[in-house]
Image (spheres, rainbow, N blue to C red):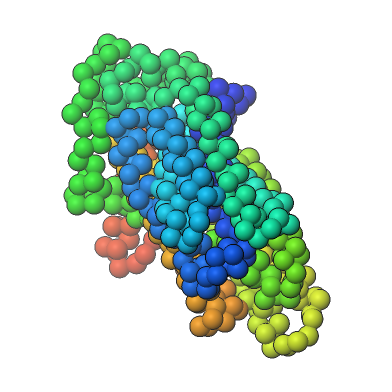
Amino acid sequence: MAQPEKPKRNMYALGCSCLASMTSIVSGYDVAVMSGANLFIKNDLKIDDTKIEILAGIINVYSIIGSIAAGRTSDWIGRRYTMILACAIFFTGALVMALAPNYAILMAGRFVAGVGVGYAFMIAPVYAAEVAPASSRGFLTSFPEVFINFGVLLGYVSNFAFAGLPEHLSWRMMFGVGAVPPVFLALGVLAMPESPRWLVMQGRLGEAKAILAKTSDTPAEAELRLSEIKEAAGIPEGDEVVPVPERSHGEGVWKELLITPTPPVRRTLLAALGLQFFQQASGIDSVVLYGPTIFEKAGLKGKTERLGATVAVGFTKTSFILVATFLLDRVGRRPLLLSSAAGMIASLITLASVLLTIDHHPGEKLTWAVALCIATVLTFVGSFSIGLGPIAWVYSSEIFPLRLRAQGASLGASMNRLMSGAVTMSFLSLYKAISISGSFYLYAGIAAAGWVFFYVFLPETRGRNLEEMEELFGKASKSREKAEEKGGIELVKGDGGESHDGRKD
């Protein structure tokens, strides 16, 4: 049941989502700062391209550990304290990297920071989704992606700012400043309320009711949300404190997700995993991490020029995600997602073609090609940020049933980090094997496959309460089963119960 348009944005829910999402700043910073730092680490520590490639991308593999652990941790100690734990991990990782005397210790610091990245990637959108009213959930749940992009931009600015220092000091300062934000973020998180849905799972209904009253658009909506959350949690109507259910800390969830899923749960899990897969497999982190390398291949030879162009990438990425936050609840997830993927495909094909042209004219400076290369990188990150970037997190955090949400979202985050690691750790080797233009043609093909997956498999979720999602994906599953029985494939659109020819199930 869609919620009516609200006359005024709920400022309390906005504040809570902002504070929670700010933990993502350090995630974006830790990932992006490596793009410039690696130019100095390579010379200072005397390491080759393979080690640089591993050092840059391994943080995403390490973050899988954090993403998986965060699901169970947040079910056990709550969403808020999980965010504080993430801040502590970030602080430790930044110090270890900044003080690392050699490659091995630097790798250890990347491991610690990676675990923190995994925690933040998973918990921030889940908390925002659970606090937000349905009418502004897309806007508020996109905040983590906004702050990730802001962190990416800060990482690029840090690269540019410290590039003039002595080589042995520049990259250490780039990592070291990352230890400052987690201290203030942890203090800010302490001022936030706990997720009302987690409180209900603990039987603390009075606290949940008070928070829902502040984060809902109307008192009637607050009562409705509480009733639906209690029903989803299997808690009967009654007193404000009830006995904690046996599964309130997430026991048995992995079995229900992976071993004995119902058709709606199976479809939900595939939707989350597929969306996160295509978000990263289409090559965004190759551009984020290896922007200076791409611009060097395009013809920008100076470090300052390359780092300056990379700052423009970060600025564009951040600007377009801000636009996306205002469109998610107005336009809907599907239109933005499909438009975003189409823009990425066009940009990748153009970028690959320009780089191919440059390769065929060695020794020549093709000014128009350099400019077009920079422009297409900007349109690629802009297209990503206006749709696929935020929607992967918004969608994955809102579609799982309450009892499965934290650990289901952690699986989606793990897929995202796994693919990010695979892409970033293979990029240098890939472009040496099939050329840099061939690499971007490959990413374009993957993005095209993603567009088909989004069109066929993802129903619209705009305006729906979180507790309605299981029913929505149940309808989608039934629609697909009927199509298969008829020997055809009906493309699920809109509310999940409408086929491509407009018939309702």
Residue name at image x 18 percent, y 49 percent: 260
Residue lying farthest to the top in this orientation: 239
Q: 111 or 375, which lies in front?
A: 111
Task: Place residue 212 in its image quadrant.
Answer: top left
Residue lying farthest to the right in this orientation: 367
Viewport quadrant of the N terminus: top left
Tell me how many marks there are: 0
**Left-right relation of 350 to 419:** right
Percent x, y for residue 75?
A: 31, 34
Q: Is residue 110 above or below residue 220?
A: below
Percent x, y for residue 283?
A: 53, 65
**Left-right relation of 337 to 241:** right
Residue 252 seen by the camera: yes
Task: Place residue 243 in its image quadrant.
Answer: top left
Percent x, y for residue 315?
A: 70, 51
Q: Is residue 308 above or below residue 252?
A: below
Residue name at image x 65 percent, y 60 percent: 167
Q: 428 or 258, which lies in front?
A: 428
Residue name at image x 28 percent, y 52 percent: 266
Q: 119 or 414, which lies in front?
A: 119
Task: Place residue 146 in its image quadrant.
Answer: top right
Residue 499 seen by the camera: no
Residue name at image x 28 percent, y 20 percent: 203
Percent x, y for residue 498?
A: 42, 51
Q: Is residue 450 above or below residue 442?
A: above
